[in-house]
Image (tube, grey):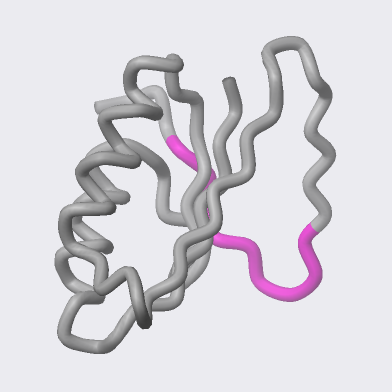
Amino acid sequence: MHVIVVYDTAQERNPKILRTCRRYLHHVQRSVFEGQLSPAQLRRFQSDVSNFLDHGYDHVIIYTLPPGAQLQRHTIGVDRPGPSDIL
């Protein structure tokens, strides 16, 4: 499934959340990530991120699109390059 993650966390937790998101998804804008995850990967990601959060202050939004759903992405301004298949 396609996943989009947006987060707003305290500055001292940002590096941990950033590293966790980068392990699973592609960094598209400051605190925005997207990519394809299996249901098991999504559960693992949610657990990993949850471990670093202050649940009374931090905020993470995870949007999921079911398989087969067509995502349309429109960019205004300078677009960051997308993920590459070349390692």
Magenta stretch in the rendered image = 75-83
- Name the outermost residue toward the top: 68
> Would you place residue 75 above or below residue 72 in this image?
below
Q: Which of these two is toward me, 12 or 54?
A: 54
- Please state the total of marks drawn on the protein image: 0
Residue 78 inside the magenta-drawn segment: yes
> Would you place residue 64 above or below residue 70 in this image?
below
- Identified at 50% across, 34% down, the residue is 35
x, y percent for residue 72? 83, 39
Q: Is residue 1 left or right of residue 52?
A: right
Q: Is residue 48 left or right of residue 3?
A: left
- Identified at 38% across, 40% down, the residue is 25
Question: The N terminus is located in which quarter?
Answer: top right
x, y percent for residue 53? 25, 66
- Identified at 26% across, 51% down, the residue is 49
Q: Which of these two is toward me, 30 or 50?
A: 50
> Would you place residue 32 above or below residue 24 in this image?
below
- Identified at 54% across, 60% down, the residue is 80
Residue 71 inside the magenta-drawn segment: no
- Name the outermost residue toward the front: 56
Q: In this view, does 79 lie to the left or right of 76?
A: left
Question: The C terminus is located in which quarter?
Answer: top left
Q: In this view, does 63 lie to the left or right of 59?
A: right
Q: In which quarter of the image is residue 74?
A: bottom right
Q: Looking at the magenta stretch, what is its main secondary structure? A: loop
